[in-house]
Amino acid sequence: MESVGWEGSGAGLSAEEMAIAFRRLREHMPGRTLTAKGPKDQPDPFRSMVSCLLSAQSRDINTAAAAKALFARAATPQAMLALSEETIAATIKPCGLYNTKARNIRKLCDVLVHQLGGRVPETREGLMQIPGIGRKCADIVLSFSFDRPIIAVDTHVHRVANRLGLTNAKTADETADQLAGHAPEWAQRDGHFWLIQFGKAVCVARRPKCGGCFLSDLCRFYAARRSLP
Ligand code: SF4
């Protein structure tokens, strides 16, 4: 079973330690690039939002295939609404939960077209009023499509932040709030990219590569594990 928190009663990283951790992450991990296009390579806010919705409980490769097939059929909310729920479900089948996701995509498009003039809101509150869009997807759209300095928190970022001791949170939304409040300002824009790459390459879910980790001297999870009898 994957461990998320550092499982100890000690404090998380101090502000100074946090700055050191982010500086090392910046040195070792790729940040935002000029070609960053949002989830599954979908650049505009509408596609970014729908791609995030498709990604729930789906592997990256399957989400990308579903998104590509769907946007080949309909690239705007108006065009999407012209498709039946059944057609959308059949098109996005690779990403799983396709009936529920198809229903939510139509609801999302309905609100966009009939209540928001076809425009994707540029605030978190506005985005989260759209059916199917929670904090994670709202932050991803704000970060990728509107270039806001926000550390969007997915499963990788949540795991890494809480193991390392950057945060001490039970949910991804709490992690997002704590990173927004405590991570250095200069780390907010690219922090998502550094943490997600680190979570995929080093601090992986089941067997984190602690032996060769450049953050092990700071890591609360590592310290807690080493102190076990
Ligand atoms: S030492 Fe590194 S790889 Fe191991 S849990 Fe801590 S951050 Fe993750």
Image (tube, helix red, strand yellow):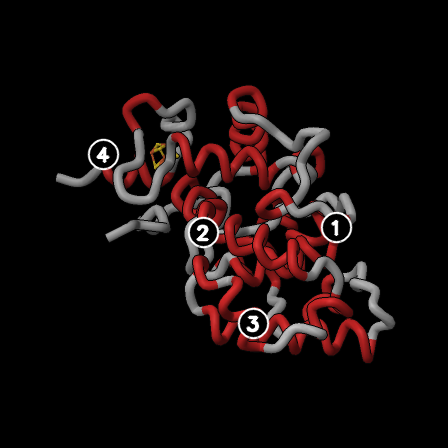
Q: Disc 1 or disc 2, which is closer to the eye?
A: 2
User: Where is mark 1, residue-wise?
Assistant: 44
Q: Looking at the figure, which quarter contains the C terminus? A: top left
User: Where is mark 3, residue-wise?
Assistant: 87
| CB atoms of marks 4 and 3 within 8 Å | no
- Report, in whole angstroms, how far the alpha carbon at label 4 lies from the one at label 3: 53 Å
| CB atoms of marks 3 and 1 within 8 Å | no
Q: Disc 4 or disc 3, which is closer to the eye?
A: 3
In the displayed structure image, the side of residue 139 where residue 20 appears, left or right: left
Hey, what amino acid is under mark 3?
A: Thr
Q: Disc 4 or disc 2, which is closer to the eye?
A: 2
Residue 170 visible to an observer of this rendering = no
User: Where is mark 2, residue-wise?
Assistant: 62
Which comes sooner in the sequence, label 1 or label 4?
1
Coordinates of residue 125 in the picture (x, y in percent): 74, 68
Which comes sooner in the sequence, label 2 or label 3?
2
- Report, in whole angstroms, how far the alpha carbon at label 1 lies from the one at label 4: 46 Å
- Kindly state the secondary structure of the residue where label 2 is placed: helix
User: Where is mark 4, residue-wise?
Assistant: 226
Hey, what amino acid is under mark 2?
A: Asn
Task: State the residue in front, 44 or 30.
Answer: 44
Q: Disc 3 or disc 1, which is closer to the eye?
A: 3
Residue 59 visible to an observer of this rendering = yes
Which comes sooner in the sequence, label 4 or label 3?
3
* Residue furthest right in the image: 117
- Kindly state the secondary structure of the residue where label 4 is placed: helix
Which comes sooner in the sequence, label 1 or label 2?
1
Coordinates of residue 193 in the picture (x, y in percent): 58, 36
